[in-house]
Amino acid sequence: MKRTLQLLLVTIFSLQLSARELQSPDGNLQLRFSLSEDGRPFYELLYKSKPVIKPSGMGLELKNSPSLIRGFEIKDLTYDRKDETWTPVWGETKEIRNQYNEMLVVVYQPSEDRQMKIRFRLFNDGLGFRYEFEKQEKLNYFQVADEHTEFALTGDHTAFWIPGDYDTNEYYYTKTRLSEVDASKVDGTGIGTHGYFHKHAVQSPLMMKTDEGLYLNIFEAALIDYSAMHLMINKENMVLTSSLTPDALGTKAYMQTPHHTPWRTVIVSDRAADILASKTILNLNEPGKIEDTSFIKPQKYIGIWWGMHVPGKMTWNYAHEPNIKLKSTDWNALTPLPQHGANNVNVRRYIDFAAEHGFSSVLVEGWNVGWEDWAGNWKEEVFDFVTPYPDFDIKALNEYAHQKGVKLMMHHETSSSVTNYERRIDDAIKVMSTHGYEAVKTGYVGWIIPRGEKHDGQWMVNHYVRVAEKMADARMMLNAHEAVRPTGLHRTWPNWLACEAARGNEFNAWSAGNPPAHETILPFTRLMGGPMDYTPGIFELKMDYYEPGNTNQVHTTLAKQLALYVTMYSPLQMAADLPENYEKRMDAFQFIKEVAVDWDESHYLEAEPGEYITVARKAKGRDSWFIGAITNEQGRETTINFSFLDPGVVYEATIYSDGKDAHWKDNPGDYQIRTLRVTNKTKLRQKLAPGGGFAISIHKRK
Ligand code: NOJ
Ligand code: CA
């Protein structure tokens, strides 16, 4: 104990002696860098003069080589700053300000004759830092055994977490103190591949709130050629330590200099809504690499999809045949199932519906051979991505769609046989180009092949980027399911419209589902790195509609499903329910038809993780606004202040709200619609049912 105290005092003393400082442009955040007595780099972060991250160690442990953790001396330290504004191809705002102060520390390890740079960028709402390794004689190729970046917290904060797991993020969130995190208590039922790697490990982004009311988000930006970062909690001292995803050999990253790690980020605010508005993750990513972005179109789509998720309606597979060998199967000889969803008649019906109601695309899953025997067998030759089933006339259907101004959206479920996909992707893209596809949804259900690789590992991280680049070269947009969670790479590859990488609406159809708080947490966690293909818009909310006695249901009201189009930002939004379910409620469907997917302005009016979010957004290039407000299982009342509207203009607002008796559990489908005139002086009080929400469209009065 005495020795620990002595060590602590020595450390604190030496930290103070050699601290180097950096301030955010507004002065609210302060960063201190120092070396401990034994030459370990430490950083510390203060917000409004109070510690947020206490002195925290840095460095990497290597495989077969001395670590890059201790024995350093400061060789050089330089400062820089930037203040620029850039225009995203699509996004929550028309322009993004990238303003930061930078400190670059060069540390040298004399015993090994190696040097490492640590680049810190301090924005007004957070910190980003990364390790950089120049090409040097003694540091050429190296393997990372683990990264030891610490985040020493100031207390036992409240956290919104999912278990540390290298293969999935499709968990529901648990809200506990950090000291209470126990991944073994989380039920992974319904998730194809799951397994926590340590009871006290959680995934990033990790959202936390301190007892003093400070909001903290720890994540990473620009994950390229490295593995995803999870966080280990030391419950003794509340220090989180980075824990990278291993490959099949247990190695966490393979490096060849020059190289650098992704940015480690800490976003801080005393206002929760500001965490949602943060652009720091995007700003830490590289500018766009696609020169001609004219093929990239934010859009709403429908799909032959929900029918496969609800009970008894449709199937992906054409026939029943549980043992398929791709090369030797005669598909024409199989007996088709009546529920095969991707058939010519059905696809035409969806195309007609899309054309009539102004949707850009129709996703068709189950169009290609192989679905009879696709998951669970760790099989390599699952799909070829080019051969349609006998009842899907790829040429005629695309022509029919194009005549009606609609595009079909390609689906490449890889079944995680990634070797197979990589071998066939060029041919698959050719088929897409030949038939005029503009977008693809990829999927990685199952354990990865090469066997032993992980969804979050470096090999897969590189694969997802390769796919995004290949699609960009072919002028295709991408939506990746079950991929590693995004880290802002859509700034660099804006054709990468969305990812799933979290527990989507589909879980409500076939599992215990998503608790009502889920959608109030996702924007603070998963969405920090980029848009999610959450697939909102379910109107028929209880599964006993399809199958009497089935107790699964969507855990929201219908009005909250509408609000999600605004609260869950994505340039790619699905109207996920079946056309026939919309046809019965055309008045409510009107909101989905109207709502924008690309924005000039976004105002997070109020937010509290796990409780509520209210946001107002102005449609790109139009004088129309849309508001979304959602709550958890508690009903609430809120007041919208319309001061964001242009002064002196009269608008007409249509309010889609929960009905008087709405309740997510027993009466989710109860909604009401009313219109009123509003100006920038209007204040509107509005109720949200338990598990409910409301959506408002606002147009200038003609
Ligand atoms: C899981 C995806 O999340 C879902 O959207 C898709 O329909 C199935 N896999 C089949 O690919
Ligand atoms: Ca999924």
Image (cartoon, rainbow, N blue to C red):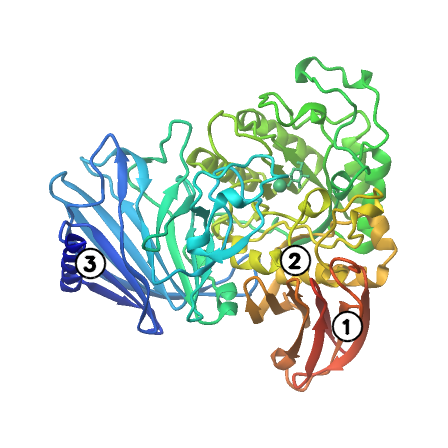
Mark toward the viewer: 1 or 3: 3
Residue displayed at 65% across by 79% down? 639
Name the mark on residue 34. Answer: 3
Name the residue: 64% across, 28% down.
375
Does residue 20 sit above or below 481 in this rendering? below
> Dot 2: what SS?
loop
Q: Which of the image's four quarters has the N terminus? A: bottom left
Disc 1 versus disc 3: distance between alpha carbons? 56 Å
State the residue at coordinates (35%, 32%). 251
Mark 3 lies within 8 Å of ligand 2 (Cβ measured) = no
Percent coordinates x, y for residue 98 in the rendering: 42, 64
Tell me which amino acid carries mark 2: Pro
Q: Which residue is mark 1?
A: 654
**Where 27 falls versus 144 (above or below)?**
below
- The answer for how far apart the CA atoms under marks 1 and 2 are is 25 Å
Q: Which comes sooner in the sequence, label 1 or label 2?
A: 2
Determine the CA span between mark 3 and mark 2.
Answer: 44 Å
Q: Which residue is mark 2?
A: 516
